[in-house]
Image (cartoon, grey):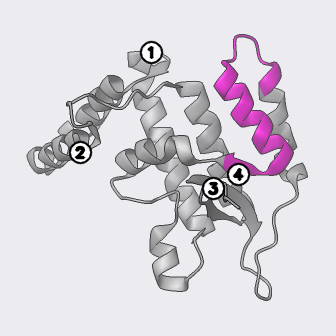
Amino acid sequence: MGLDNVAVHWPRTGRFYDPVAPAEFVDFGEIVDLPRISAPTAALAELIAKTGTVRATAYTELVDLLLGLDGVLYATDAAAEDEDPVIDPDGCAWIADGIERFVAGHREHGEAVTFESVSAVLRSLLGDGRLAEQQLRWLDGRLDALRDERGEPPQWDFTCAELGVLAAFYRRCADRGFAVYAESEAPRRATHS
C-alpha cells in the first residue's frame, strides 16, 4: 500500500480538498542542482517541486518513531475524528519541528541516517529529560518492535539532507496555511478472466 502526502488548501471548500498549485513548491527544484546531492534527496525535492506531494511510504516508520505516535503521515487520528485523513497546518508544523530537531541532533553522527544512528540520537535527546528512565524504556520497546522476526533492524538508508527536504515540505505547508491530505492507495491486483 502506497502513501502520498498531498498539499491541499485549508480548510476545504465544499466536499473536497483543493490541491495546492505546484508553483508554491517550485523552489524545491533548486535542490536538485546542488553539488553532491544524493539521488533520493534530489528525487524527493523534484517530486515536491513538480507536484506538491511527498511519497511518504518510505518515511512512515521513521517519522512515527521520531514523533512517538503511530500513523502520523497517514493522519490516522484525523481520519478517526473527521473521516478525512488530513494533517492540518498545526500538525504540519509539529511534524516539521520533530524532524528538524532530529536532523539537528543527528549532525554529530554524520550524514547517513541508519537505525543505529536514530537510536543513538533519540537516546541522547530522551536521556536529558525529566522522565528519562521511563522514556528510554519506551524507546527500547519501540525499537524492538521495529525489528523483524530474526531480530534484524529495518534497513533505513536516509540522509540528513533528505530528511531536511522532508521537513521543509511540512514547514512550507505550516507556514503558508496548507494542510496535507494523506492519500493511500492499495496496490492494484491483476484480475483473471
- Which residue is under mark 4? 172
- Which residue is under mark 1? 110
Q: Residues within 10 Å of mark 3 (few under 14, many from 20)?
A: few
Q: Per the image, is 118 magenta?
A: no
* 129 left or right, relative to 17: left
Q: Is residue 137 above or below residue 5?
A: above
What mark, if any, has residue 145 been given in the picture? Answer: 2
Residue 22, position in %: x, y? Answer: 86, 51
Q: How many marks?
A: 4
Image quarter in which the N terminus is found: bottom right
Q: Residues within 10 Å of mark 4 (few under 14, many from 20)?
A: some
Residue 180, position in %: x, y? Answer: 66, 63
Residue at mark 2 to residue at mark 4: CA–CA distance: 32 Å
Most extreme residue toward the left is 133
Q: Residues within 10 Å of mark 1 (few under 14, many from 20)?
A: few
Q: From the viewer's perspective, is the residue at label 2 or at label 3 nearer?
A: 3
Residue depicted at 9% across the width and 45% down the height: 133
Residue depicted at 32% across the width and 30% down the height: 121
- Which residue is under mark 3? 189
Which span of residues is magenta-colored?
32-54
What mark, if any, has residue 163 been given in the picture? Answer: none
Residue at mark 2 to residue at mark 1: CA–CA distance: 25 Å
Identify the amino acid type marked 3.
Answer: Arg
Q: From the viewer's perspective, is the residue at label 3 or at label 4 nearer?
A: 3
Which quadrant of the view contains residue 84? bottom right
Q: From the viewer's perspective, is the residue at label 2 or at label 1 nearer?
A: 2
Q: Main secondary structure of the magenta part?
A: helix
Residue at mark 3 to residue at mark 4: CA–CA distance: 36 Å
Image quarter in which the C terminus is found: bottom right
Which numbered disc flags the more N-terminal residue, 3 or 4? 4
Task: Check disc 1 and report its element: helix, strand or loop.
Answer: loop
Which numbered disc flags the more N-terminal residue, 2 or 1? 1
